[in-house]
């Protein structure tokens, strides 16, 4: 298991994750002062976000359908990584790109990207 979002499992065999990105952001307030360096002060707390990207081939192109239904619930969910880290997150977006079309209109591969935001109660 590389990651689990709610009950949806992301594994190397089922839906190939190519990368996991973890971002930590801080907000700074800067004020210009005459004859001196600017004054800098941190505002609030940090923001933490994660994103996944991967590629699905032939047999597993429909694997994200259940996950898409989870995204539409628009509720915080539990993210557990294979390293043991566990967070409550909101799913901000699910982007899917279908590629390698066949004559009947079906596609052979699908790339996806999932954007998550850490959720604090």
Image: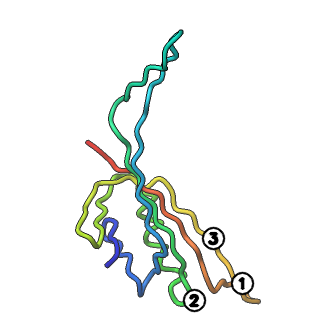
Q: Badge 1: how crowded within 10 Å, few (<14), some, or many (20+)?
A: few
Whether residue 4 sits left or right of residue 62 in the image: it is: left
Q: Which mark is residue 116?
A: none
Give the labeled residue for mark 1.
101
**Which quarter of the figure is the N terminus placed in?**
bottom left
Q: Position of residue 9 (x, y in %)?
A: 35, 75
Give the labeled residue for mark 2.
58
User: Foreground: 39 or 29?
Assistant: 39
**If you read the primary sequence from the N terminus, does the residue marked by circle 2 or circle 3 appear first?**
2
- Name which residue lies at 29% across and 73% down: 82
Q: Position of residue 21 (x, y in %)?
A: 44, 62
User: Foreground: 17 or 64?
Assistant: 17
SS for tag 3?
strand
Circles 1 and 2 in contact, beta carbons < 8 Å: no
The image quarter containing residue 50 is: bottom left
Q: Badge 3: how crowded within 10 Å, few (<14), some, or many (20+)?
A: few
Question: In the image, is residue 43 above or below residue 88?
Answer: above
Whether residue 104 sits left or right of residue 24 in the image: it is: right
**If you read the primary sequence from the N terminus, does the residue marked by circle 1 or circle 2 appear first?**
2
Give the labeled residue for mark 3.
97
- Name which residue lies at 45% across and 80% down: 15
SS for tag 1?
strand
- Name which residue lies at 71% across and 84% down: 101
- Name which residue lies at 34% across and 71% down: 3
Whether residue 64 sits left or right of residue 86 in the image: it is: right
């Amino acid at each position: 298991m590389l990651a689990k979002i709610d009950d949806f499992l992301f594994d190397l065999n089922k839906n190939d994750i190519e990368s996991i990105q973890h971002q930590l952001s801080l907000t700074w307030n800067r004020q210009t002062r005459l004859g001196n360096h600017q004054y800098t002060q941190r505002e609030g707390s940090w923001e933490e976000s994660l994103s996944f990207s991967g590629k699905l081939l032939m047999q597993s192109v429909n694997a994200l359908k259940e996950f898409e239904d989870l995204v539409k619930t628009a509720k915080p969910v539990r993210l557990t990584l294979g390293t043991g880290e566990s967070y409550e997150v909101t799913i901000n977006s699910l982007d899917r790109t279908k590629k390698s079309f066949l004559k009947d209109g079906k596609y052979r591969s699908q790339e996806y990207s999932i954007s998550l935001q850490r959720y604090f109660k």
